[in-house]
């Protein structure tokens, strides 16, 4: 074969190879994705070798810390936010979380008045580990007004409303500025900000029969509604009662129907009154003993802290039947003054030395405790420690 013929043969062979190769590639990519992924010697775009490696966040006591999760690639790092990243705070060596079941507890923070040290009363917000993430020191000139227990609640505007018994009610912002206040020596344990901007509170501090036991005030401090127990209870066996006042009314709340729920501690009852001030219902007679913080639940039942022996959190239905209760058997934790039903069905119960969260099966799923309880002896213990608490879910 001459040189010209040989060159043509080489060219024909090259064209044939190109045609065969092109046809093979075309056939390969016509196959299904499943066949493509399983083809030996090939690498799918879903190959695990191309997926960024995600590093886990630090965990303490089974709880996620603030370290973000990061996904690393060859070019950069991508921050992946966690669903529940815990804000870390300052460790207080006198506070300890004894129990925390993160699968059953209601995740959030807990806001409470802190009177462990009567010389340094404060309001604190703690995370699920008991670390303090925010605190407010009661001003020096007001610190003596924390007994017999002060109330704290978070407002919709993120401000905080708190009561100093025998002194007044205050609203502060998160920068710790007092933005509103109303002073009165008659105020005792409880105050609520209403949806109309008014403030509802109890006049139970050493109250007389001539006093109003509940008052609603506007932003100027003017009384726009009040209720007098004498209109219905100026009779025996109530006339001669006296313990830190005639009624020592200790809680009040405005119901969705416009009526008002009032806890008359010394009478061991809760009453519902209408807008005219008429008593339309008496609750808990023969069952309640020095009850605190009754709250009407969405199911129509009433939940409250009861001072019987043993002290307990009690839920009763509209017939007055006990449908659920949780005993605080350790008398060193008494008094028990607060019980709140959480959105997951658990109940947050505040005792003097511990705040416990229990589920409907009465299993303790979270406990915040005071380590040093050496000061909690006799009558003095009633004015120390914890008083109320609320779980904040953000």
Image (cartoon, rainbow, N blue to C red):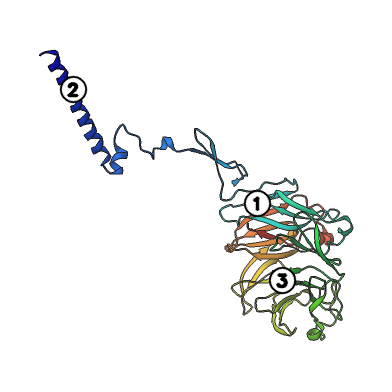
Q: Residue at x 72, y 71 (%)?
A: 194
Q: Residues within 10 Å of mark 3 (few under 14, many from 20)?
A: some
Residue 117 visible in the shown view: yes
Q: Do residues under tags 3 and 2 come within 8 Å of each other at their CB atoms?
A: no
Q: Which mark is residue 128?
A: 1
Q: Measure the C-alpha gap from mark 3 to mark 1.
A: 29 Å
Q: Number of marks in the image? A: 3
Q: Residues within 10 Å of mark 1 (few under 14, many from 20)?
A: many
Q: Residue tagged by mark 2? A: 11
Q: Residue at x 58, y 52 (%)?
A: 102
Q: Earlier in the sequence, mark 3 or mark 2?
A: 2
Q: Earlier in the sequence, mark 2 or mark 1?
A: 2
Asked which secondary structure carries label 1, the reply is: loop
5 above or below 191?
above
Q: Residue 32: give x, y in percent of width and height.
A: 28, 44
Q: Measure the C-alpha gap from mark 3 to mark 2.
A: 93 Å
Q: Do residues under tags 2 and 1 come within 8 Å of each other at their CB atoms?
A: no
212 above or below 20?
below
Quarter occupied by the C terminus = bottom right
Q: Residue tagged by mark 3? A: 194
Q: Measure the C-alpha gap from mark 2 to mark 1.
A: 78 Å
């Amino acid at each position: 074969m001459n040189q010209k013929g040989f060159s043509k043969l080489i060219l024909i062979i090259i064209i044939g190879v190109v045609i065969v190769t092109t046809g093979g590639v075309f056939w390969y990519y016509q196959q299904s994705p499943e066949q493509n992924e399983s083809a030996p010697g090939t690498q799918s775009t879903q190959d695990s070798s191309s997926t960024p490696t995600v590093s886990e966040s630090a965990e303490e006591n089974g709880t996620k810390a603030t370290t973000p999760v990061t996904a690393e690639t060859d070019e950069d790092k991508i921050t992946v936010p966690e669903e529940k990243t815990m804000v870390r705070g300052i460790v207080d060596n006198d506070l300890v979380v004894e129990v925390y079941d993160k699968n059953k507890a209601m995740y959030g923070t807990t806001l409470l008045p802190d009177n462990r040290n009567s010389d340094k009363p404060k309001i604190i917000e703690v995370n699920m580990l008991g670390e303090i993430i925010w605190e407010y020191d009661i001003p020096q000139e007001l610190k003596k007004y924390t007994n017999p227990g002060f109330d704290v609640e978070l407002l919709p505007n993120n401000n905080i409303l708190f009561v100093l018994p025998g002194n007044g009610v205050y609203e502060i912002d998160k920068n710790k500025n007092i933005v509103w206040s109303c002073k009165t020596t008659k105020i005792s344990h409880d105050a609520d900000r209403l949806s109309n901007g008014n403030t509802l509170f109890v006049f139970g501090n050493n109250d007389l029969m001539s006093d109003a036991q509940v008052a609603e005030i506007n932003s100027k401090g003017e009384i726009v509604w009040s209720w007098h127990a004498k209109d219905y209870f100026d009779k025996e066996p109530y006339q001669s009662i006296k313990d830190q006042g005639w009624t020592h009314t200790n809680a009040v709340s405005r119901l969705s129907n416009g009526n008002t729920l009032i806890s008359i501690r010394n009478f061991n009852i809760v009453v519902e009154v209408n807008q005219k001030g008429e008593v339309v219902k008496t609750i808990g007679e023969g069952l309640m003993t020095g009850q605190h913080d009754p709250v009407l639940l969405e199911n129509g039942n009433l939940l409250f802290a009861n001072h019987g022996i043993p002290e307990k959190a009690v839920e009763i239905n509209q017939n007055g039947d006990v449908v659920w209760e949780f005993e605080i058997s350790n008398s060193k934790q008494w008094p028990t003054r607060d019980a709140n039903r959480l959105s997951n069905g658990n109940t947050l119960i505040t005792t003097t030395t511990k705040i416990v969260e229990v589920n409907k099966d009465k299993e303790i799923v979270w406990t915040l405790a005071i380590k040093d309880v050496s000061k909690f002896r006799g009558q003095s213990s009633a004015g120390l420690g914890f008083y109320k608490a609320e779980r904040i879910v953000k």
